Image (cartoon, grey):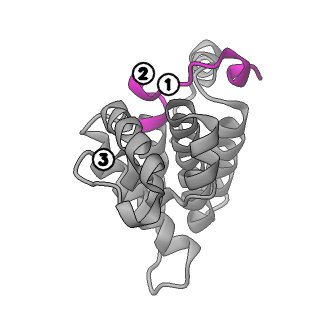
Amino acid sequence: VAVVQPIEQILHVTTNLTCLECHRLDEAINCQQSNCYMASTVMAASAVEARLHYLAEKNIGIGLYKKYFGESTLGSLIHLFNPRTKLDPKRYSRDDYKNLGKLTENLKKIVPVQHQPLLDLVNEYRIFTAHPKIASIDYKIAESILNLSFSFLLDPTAKITDKKLLKH
């Protein structure tokens, strides 16, 4: 049985999400309700990926972000924000590596430690659903991924600060 939330609560939540994130989460919910669990999982994960791209661009700067991370996958972005991982110096110029080292250390402080396993799980199931794997996604898994995605996107530590992006 679905629980109907008062419209004020729903509107309050969406004011903390970008239009892109709302569209992707709406699509995830529609897919979930249509029993399309793999599609729901992919769309929920893409909303998380959009937020990580925003946080990376905002904190690294547009130039270095576009040069090294603009086309990054969800897994690469999670790696970038994970405090247990380090940059590979072979992938960057010496000057960029030095600058990125300082900037990515700041990124590692943005995503709370408790969200790292959550992000890894969202990505793992995104891989299962977006690539040919021998795994099925049922309602409970898809619902869990959708809930984990909302949990991350609505956490105040990972919020969008650009008010223009929050207008719907």
Q: Which residue lies furthest to the right in this view?
A: 168
Query: Which kind of residue does numbered mark 2 sit on?
Result: Pro
Front residue (pair 9, 113): 113
Q: In this view, does 115 lie above or below 9?
A: below
Magenta-colored span: 152-168
Q: How many labels does the image show?
A: 3
Could you tell me how far apart the alpha carbons at marks 1 and 2 are, in whole angstroms? 5 Å
Front residue (pair 114, 138): 114
Name the mark on residue 116.
Answer: 3
Compared across the picture, whether 114 is left or right of 55 comes to: left
Residue occupying the point 39% across, 24% down? 157
Q: How crowded is mark 2: few (under 14 residues within 10 Å), some or many (20 or more)?
A: few
Task: Determine contact: label 1, label 2, CB under 8 Å.
Answer: yes
Name the mark on residue 156.
Answer: 2
Q: Residues within 10 Å of mark 3 (few under 14, many from 20)?
A: some
Q: Is residue 83 magenta?
A: no
